[in-house]
Amino acid sequence: MNLEHREIPQALHNEEGDGELHSHCRVCDCYLLEDETEYYLEKVVRRVPELQTQQTLFEFAVCANCLQELRKALSKESKRAMEQFFQQKMQAVFFNQPHTNLYEAFENGRCLFTGKKTDEFETFQMAAYCKGRHLHSQQPPIIISDETIEESTELLSAQTRDELNNFVNSNFGWPPEFAKLLTEGDLALL
Ligand SMILES: [Zn+2]
């Protein structure tokens, strides 16, 4: 299979845009679908078991430049703590299941870190790093459950959380409670 040209999964297409690919950065509005343009995609989903359905809380695309700005809001200590957290999680995944195929895990709707299906969670997020119309090579899309997100949030200092809330509020116009979801999705890929 050509690793350079994996399709962006349908689940990460733009629901508001009739299921097309996200085409513009949510922050600076630059165009994303040029071949060499790198950007990050994220979608946060809440399950509604009573109705046997799920609801997208928010979804967005952010270009690599804006993502870098976002990361500046984090102190070095927080960044290091988060990176270590996700690195250890990744190592555990491969230690326990050496043959884990990350692309398959995503397709099967499994949280990368817990291995559980998304229907066991109240909320979960999906994220991918992309280049133009395709996934960035060797950057599999991932699903992260609320369980893992909560665990990682405990690593952020109160100050860092404030900074991130401010950034998200000024650029996205979303409620602050989504801020932590947003930023941890970002860090999970780094
Ligand atoms: Zn941007």
Image (cartoon, rainbow, N blue to C red):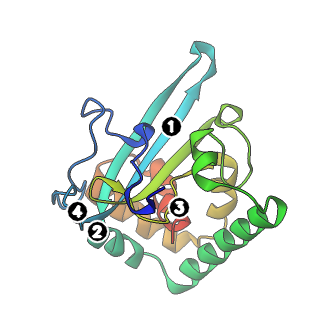
**Which residue is located at x 56 percent, y 69 percent?**
158
Mark linked to residue 64: none
The residues tagged by marks 2 and 4 sit, at their Cα atoms, a distance apart of 18 Å
- Asked if residue 7 shows in the view, the reply is yes
**Residue furthest top as drawn:** 51
**Tag 2's secondary structure?**
helix
x, y (%) of residue 126?
A: 51, 47
Of marks 2 and 4, the one in the foreground: 4
Of mark 1 and mark 4, the one earlier in the sequence is 4
Residue beneath disc 1: 45
**Tag 1's secondary structure?**
strand
x, y (%) of residue 118?
A: 64, 37
Q: Is mark 2 within 8 Å of ligand 1?
A: yes
- Asked if residue 145 shows in the view, the reply is no
Q: Which amino acid does label 1 sit on?
A: Val
**Tag 3's secondary structure?**
helix
In the depicted view, which residue is nearer to us: 151 or 93? Answer: 93
Q: What residue type is labelled 4?
A: Asp
Of mark 2 and mark 1, the one earlier in the sequence is 1
Is 16 on the left or on the right of 56, as rendered? Answer: left
Residue beneath disc 4: 35
x, y (%) of residue 92?
A: 78, 66
The residues tagged by marks 3 and 1 sit, at their Cα atoms, a distance apart of 15 Å
Of mark 2 and mark 4, the one earlier in the sequence is 4
The residues tagged by marks 4 and 3 sit, at their Cα atoms, a distance apart of 27 Å
Residue beneath disc 2: 66
Q: Determine the image quadrant of residue 155.
A: bottom right
**Which residue is located at x 61 percent, y 39 percent?**
109
**Residue furthest front as drawn:** 1
Q: What residue type is labelled 2?
A: Cys
